[in-house]
């Protein structure tokens, strides 16, 4: 080999070495980046851990807070509002009843026809209307005029004879108003504060039913407001109508809340509540529950700090549909800052609440072999393009961790309620009719009504929740506790309560 040839050979060798070194270097770097991202996921998994031992602490904390909230006005972050609903529909109600449902995604007017004993709900008609946005921050008169006008339009279209109405021949109305209300009777209450984007200053501190009544009068409507409730109470009413073993109701949609039937002697702050009564429904406002046992991560802390209501609704921020997608977005953003596996950080990825929870569930439940839906949503919603399969899998993992924690915490909350009323096996209170020593004799069938888009539409969430309830309760007790979907309970339930509270004639005896 001549000098020139030798030099070329050496040169080629050097270049290929350099190329090889560069390739190896790149691989090492990309491996390091990948490991950093995996580290973020690991840390998330640990931070969101919900072993059953921890869930049991949450169960205990929920029961303790419930006690404290009932014992005194500022005893707990749980408001434990008395509803004055001391009886629930049984299935014997008959006639046509109406309901208004305000406080969910849509405003709704309903008509429900009840067939009396054993015939159940013969039919129900619903009209949904979005609330015009300007009314959410306008005056109470504007808002209630809109409601009364919608109600009038609903009546004008219907073909109902007075004789088809309730046996008392009045139009009886149940009003579901899902905001914090200080209830004064079963059919009236004072608005404590607005939530969910509503802000109508001249309404706070006023009687909600009175405002509706005045607006109805302006429209020439003569109706009787028989019940003023919130969506959880409506759901409990529907659950109880369908199954008399229903003792509690939980809503898991955009937000989350729960209510349950409490014994009279457990309601210490009596507030005019007659001792002779058998108890009443308590609206927990459980979205505001807090306990040091809740597994909280830096993502939760930042989400809370940047929210319009910091230090408020802590439980809700870990559980409900409003927030789960946003937690996932925050994790992806953090990973993007640590490494470029998601490519350059897009402006979309930096936008709070851009990843809505239904999109998160679509990614989580993507069953295509190459996770096409994940790729599409990352691309279209978060501006993250062309990521390899392993990165898409990572995103599915994040969704799984966030949803699993949410569902398991909600499950612990539910068991907390059962514990408070002695239906979790620990107190053995359940069977007052219990005979004999066998423990299963002490167990009583217990139904919890569940409603809300997160639970109904997000299969993985629902499965994690159901599994966790069974896991916390244990094999012996789990078969006695049944979660039942009470679809549209917030509206239908209010109509049922209108029947229960309108007149004794309205019930078959
Ligand atoms: P609201 O809470 O306003 O009364 P819903 O009970 O219907 O209304 O709940 C709607 C919420 O449920 C949405 O805001 C969303 O967070 C959640 N949700 C609806 N559909 C899905 C879905 N397919 N997957 C995950 N979450 C969903
Ligand atoms: Mg709702």
Image: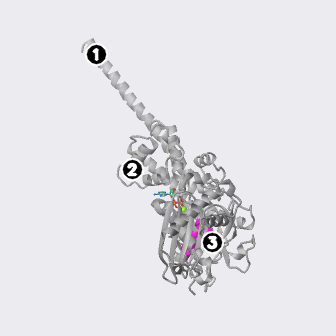
* Quadrant of the drawing holding the C terminus: bottom right
Residue 219 in percent (x, y) is at 59, 65
Which residue position is annotated with label 1?
6
The residue wearing badge 3 is 227
> Where residue 342 sits in the image (x, y, percent)?
45, 40
The earlier-in-sequence mark between 3 and 1 is: 1
Which image quadrant is residue 87 in? bottom right
- Label 2 belongs to which residue? 373
Q: Is the magenta stretch mostly helix, strand or loop?
A: helix
Q: How is the image coloured?
A: one colour
- The quadrant the N terminus occupies is top left
Which residue shows up at 58% across the image and 65% down it?
Answer: 231
Q: Farthest residue to the bottom: give it.
A: 509
Rendered position, 462 above or below 351: below
Q: Alpha-carbon distance for marks 1 and 2?
A: 56 Å
Mark 3: which secondary structure?
A: strand
Q: Where is residue 503 in the image (x, y as percent from the top left)?
A: 62, 80
Tag 3: Cα neighbours inside 10 Å, few (<14), some, or many (≥20)?
many
- Callout 1: SS: helix
Q: Is residue 10 above or below residue 40?
A: above
Mark 1 and mark 2 in contact? Answer it, CB < 8 Å.
Answer: no
325 or 446, which lies in front? 325
């Amino acid at each position: 080999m001549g000098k020139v040839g030798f030099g070329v050979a050496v040169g080629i060798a050097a270049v290929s070495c350099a190329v090889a070194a560069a390739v190896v270097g790149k691989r090492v770097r990309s491996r390091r980046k990948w490991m950093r991202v995996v580290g973020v996921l690991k840390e998330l998994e640990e931070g969101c851990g919900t072993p059953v031992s921890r869930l049991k602490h949450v169960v205990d904390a929920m029961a303790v807070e419930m006690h404290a909230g009932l014992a005194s006005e500022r005893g707990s972050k749980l408001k434990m509002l008395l509803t004055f609903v001391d009886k629930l529909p049984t299935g014997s109600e008959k006639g046509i009843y109406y309901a208004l449902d305000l406080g969910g995604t849509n405003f709704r007017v309903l008509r429900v026809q009840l067939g009396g004993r054993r015939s159940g709900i013969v039919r129900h008609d619903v009209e949904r209307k979005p609330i015009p946005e300007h009314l959410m921050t306008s005056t109470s008169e504007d808002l209630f005029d809109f409601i009364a006008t919608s109600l009038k339009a609903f009546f004008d279209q219907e073909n109902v004879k007075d004789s088809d109405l309730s046996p008392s021949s009045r139009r009886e109305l149940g009003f579901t108003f899902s905001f914090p209300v200080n209830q004064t009777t079963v059919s009236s209450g004072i608005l404590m504060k607005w939530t969910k984007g509503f802000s109508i200053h001249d309404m706070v501190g006023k009687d909600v039913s009175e405002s509706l009544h005045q607006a109805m009068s302006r429209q020439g409507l003569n109706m009787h407001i028989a019940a003023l409730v919130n969506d959880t109470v409506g759901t409990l009413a529907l659950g109880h109508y369908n199954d008399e073993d229903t003792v509690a109701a939980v809503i898991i949609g955009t937000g989350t809340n729960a209510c349950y039937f409490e014994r009279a002697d457990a309601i210490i702050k009596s507030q005019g509540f007659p001792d002779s009564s058998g108890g009443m429904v308590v609206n927990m406002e459980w979205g505001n529950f807090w306990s040091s046992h809740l597994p909280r991560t830096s993502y939760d802390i930042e989400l809370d700090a940047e929210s319009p209501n910091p230090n408020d609704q802590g439980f809700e921020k870990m559980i409900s549909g409003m927030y789960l997608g946003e937690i996932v977005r925050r994790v992806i953003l953090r990973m993007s800052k640590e490494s470029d596996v998601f490519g350059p950080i897009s402006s979309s990825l930096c936008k709070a609440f851009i990843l809505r929870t239904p999109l998160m569930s679509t990614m989580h439940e993507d069953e295509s072999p190459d996770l096409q839906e994940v790729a599409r949503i990352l691309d279209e919603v978060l501006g993250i393009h062309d990521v390899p399969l392993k990165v898409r899998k990572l995103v599915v993992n994040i969704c799984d961790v966030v949803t699993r924690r949410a569902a398991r915490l909600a499950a612990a909350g539910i068991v907390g309620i059962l514990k408070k009323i002695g239906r979790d096996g620990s107190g053995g209170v359940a069977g007052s009719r219990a005979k004999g020593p066998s423990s299963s004799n002490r167990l009583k069938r217990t139904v919890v009504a569940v409603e809300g888009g997160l639970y109904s539409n997000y299969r993985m969430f629902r499965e994690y929740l159901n599994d966790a309830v069974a896991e916390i309760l244990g094999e012996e007790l789990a078969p006695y506790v049944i979660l039942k979907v009470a679809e549209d309970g917030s509206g239908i339930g209010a109509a049922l309560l209108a029947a229960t509270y309108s007149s004794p004639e309205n019930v078959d005896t």
